[in-house]
Image (cartoon, rainbow, N blue to C red):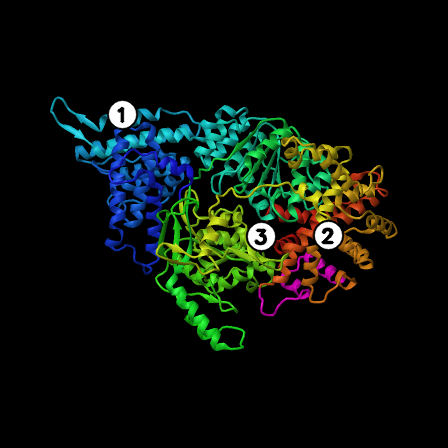
Amino acid sequence: MFNKITANILRMLPPVKGVDIERIPQLLSKVYAHIVGLKTKYEVGILEFEAEEIDDDYRTLSELAFTLELYLESGKFGEKQNAIAYVAAMSHKLMSKLKPMQPEAFDADAIPSDVAAMLMFIIGGYLADAEELANNIKRHEGESDVGWQLKNSIALLANGKLKELLEIQEVRLEVADLELYAQELLWKQLTVGIKALANKLLGREGEDWQQYVRNVIQLAAFKDEATGYRFDFVGVSRLAHLLLLAMNVLEHHSLLMVVRPYLTTSNHYELILHKIEQRPYLWQNHINAIEQDFLKDGVSSVITFPTGAGKSTLLELKLLQHVAVGGRAVYLVPTHALEHQVKGHMEHLLQTEEYKEISLGREFTTEEEDDELVKVMTPERCSTLLALKPSVFEGVTLVVMDEFHIIGEEGHRSLGAMYCLVSLLCIVPDADFVLSSAMVENGKEMSDWVADVTRRTCLNLSMAWKPTSQLQGCVVYPLDRCRELGQLAFQDKQNRGKRKSPSSNLKKRLTVTPYCLFSLQNTWESDKMADYYLTPVLDHDVTIGVNNNWKLIGNRNQVTKELAKKFAALRMKTIVFVENPTQANSLVKQLDGEISLQSHSEKLQSKIRSIYEELGNANCTYIKDEMGAVPHHSLLLPEERHVIEDLFRCKHDIMVATATLAQGVNLPVDVVLIAGEDRYDVDKDSRGLMDAHEILNAAGRAGRAGFRSQGAAILVSNSVIGFQNNKLTDAWFALKSNIFSKGDNCLTVKDPFERLIKETEESREQKLVLMKLNLAGENERRILSKSLYAFQLRKRKEETDEFLEKMIHLTSQYGEVGKDTLLELSLKTGTDRQLLENFYHWLKEANVDRASTVMDLLKLYCCWLLERPVALKELLTYESTLELMLKLFGNGQKLDGDLIKKLYVVLEQYVMGCDLLTISASFHESKNDPYLTQTRKFVIKVLPELSYAFSVLAMVHILVLNEFYLWKEDIPMIVKNFATYLKEGVTSEDMLRLKTERRMMRVEAHRRFKE
């Protein structure tokens, strides 16, 4: 459950009677696993477990917490203070899960256990756990105003709400009893000290907070020499001692204190203060990185922290460092979904008067502003700009590539992403580069590579620590029962004779009780059963499946559904990962709910109405009233996805998702359920195991710092895994070996250029990269020499000449640029030169200067395609896009004039603001599918690629118009920005501005523009 660094910290404890310190991580993990298992046995509404089921655990935790608190207060174990505080706090937290307690109040002799745990988590350096407790602090029914003000102040300090803390008004003391008056006076002094620290953390002048806390410690045990009367406030003294330790830790973790040496301008100071208002503290891994000069100009980094370890915080701080001194940044992300998410973060981060401009980039067009501070884009968009308008990158001082493992993944995108990165290493050689991914195993090699090609320092930031912890397990079944069911299947096969499938009667009888086998370690490395914990996960049987060979299978989706229902009924936020959108939608339909959309905020309801308008009918959206779960998959419109994520954060407890969620989206989750470890491989036309990093990345969604610091991830295999007497069937060992014995960093990045020179046939994507390399001319060899493969050859003391010559030979087949502008455009766009020349001459004869609207241009370009439909295949980057398009327009559709006519109708409707229901008439939609699946696929998957294809035609058009206009600036904007207008579905620059600035959906933008 605990990462290796946290586990090692736990083992630093001093001796505790009756506890094996070496196995403390397993002990705490076992208790949490026991709690997860116990919860599933009880009916909804039962809050307390039976005493005999929890007594042993509770007694052990209680003794552990009591002993460690004494150690902490003694002050004798300074070097082990972190471990003592963390385990004591975790013991309190687990005890509260075993026996939920009513809110407690401060009194003279004791402090509330949740406040003590909160402060001890801070002392231990686990600020996220403290924040989670702070978010759940409640007032005791009889608690005084002064006591509640102190408790609330501590909570606000812990969760970083410093401005809110400073706005708390002082409470007047109205207590007649002298002793109680003295006690509350001491509490007030602690509150004043807390506010003094808050002022300091915000960079304001103020009094020394320590003097207030130390004064309270002295006054908490006071004796009046004249009367002999003694005040001895044990609770106040203990609280003050814990506060002193905790507040020192918060000062050490202060964002302002840590980055202060790097604040070189007033603008930077202003940006940091704005950041502090959002999050004033850093985690220890952030501090370690900054102490290694992560923020220093001229220092690059490769960050391979695990999922949920705060990589984005470091990226933001590095970006602020560059922007504040007049630099500019390129921020690369793998998907459009992340592009919009990161842009939102950047806008919030730079929300000051001085800094406002962040760009997502226009869609495949040369009309790109050169002076934006931060450009957020995909590698494909960046590669296009590198070819079409390299001046955009002048002045760039920082390049961030998030989820950089895409440069080494199998598939068509890796080569383009690697070309993009290597080109940037050449075109902005003096920039700092930061590569970030939780999945990469060879981070040290990556940092050595970047250091080698930039000839500057590149840090390898690979600390395995993270603030959350996950139990990881899989569903197993009693082996005796599995054998009984296997025998039933065998008998059914005998009885069925020549019939080719099992009987329905057999399928009903395949019931069995599910258990979960949790690993008590972070990875399944151990072969000892003592390092695993077996627990029931449902209070009823489930029905497993049988295939047409009468072999038992896991029936993963239905078993996962039953688990999700149980966890959600216990108000545990649950994400279910399934294979595809069809399965996600099917599972959502099977989960009934009672949450009305009308119960949500007006702002959210307004977004939903806009989605209805875009689709044309409320029935066409995946957002339904009274859903028991929400879907999350690749067929959601971006706005639908944002609303669904908000619904899950607010009130829904189940999300059924595909792999689109596993990357980069952070949601508060208690339990992740993964339905199966295999999937259908289109290329191989068969099922195969998912890559380990895909499953582990999904599992890493369990728990979220500050909200759910502990979580559980459970795999429901499609194999039936049996257990008996500490023995397991082979399928479990396959999971252990192939997936769960690995950590987050389980993907080795390999250079796709190495694969390219070994392949016999070039794909369309490879051809595009080769053409862009050819365009580099004399710089081609320099670009290739900076590749990872060239670095690896040099490191092995092998010559790079053979690799470089092979690559240059591959690129030379596309000719030399010289003064041939069409050939140059061909190489920039990866399009056949002869095709471009054909279009060029066709345009010159077509009176192109008369095209004055977006629709004129669309009709013009489609007229040319109508005469030669096969040109569309050459214009599209990916062959799969054309295949999908043909399929969407109906079975038997060919690449002919009929397709171009249909395409023109759809694009015309889209640009003119028709809703998707109207547009769907052109597609082969199923009558049983209300969601307009085919139309969605066109808009989400085909249209972005079409916009690129039409941008190529627009660029040829610009070459022709150069002969008509004296000044390049006079060329109509509709030609320059045609690809963007097409992608966004607008008819003018003014409408585009309205849509983007007010963040409207397309149909709403058309309506508002007309108004």
| Residue shown at 68% from the left, 40% from the top | 419
Quarter of the figure that contains the C terminus: bottom right
Residue for badge 3: 638
Labels in figure, total: 3
Apparent side of residue 38 relative to residue 203 in the rendered image (left or right):
left
Disc on the earlier residue, 3 or 1: 1
Q: Residues within 10 Å of mark 2 (few under 14, many from 20)?
A: many
Q: How far from the left and from the top, in percent, is residue 792?
A: 63, 34
Q: Residues within 10 Å of mark 1 (few under 14, many from 20)?
A: some
Alpha-carbon span between mark 2 and mark 3:
23 Å
Examine the image and state in which quarter residue 973 appears.
Answer: top right
Residue for badge 1: 215
Residue 160 visible, this angle: no
Residue for badge 2: 876
Examine the image and state in which quarter residue 127 appears.
Answer: top left
Q: Which portion, as a residue range, is magenta?
A: 901-930
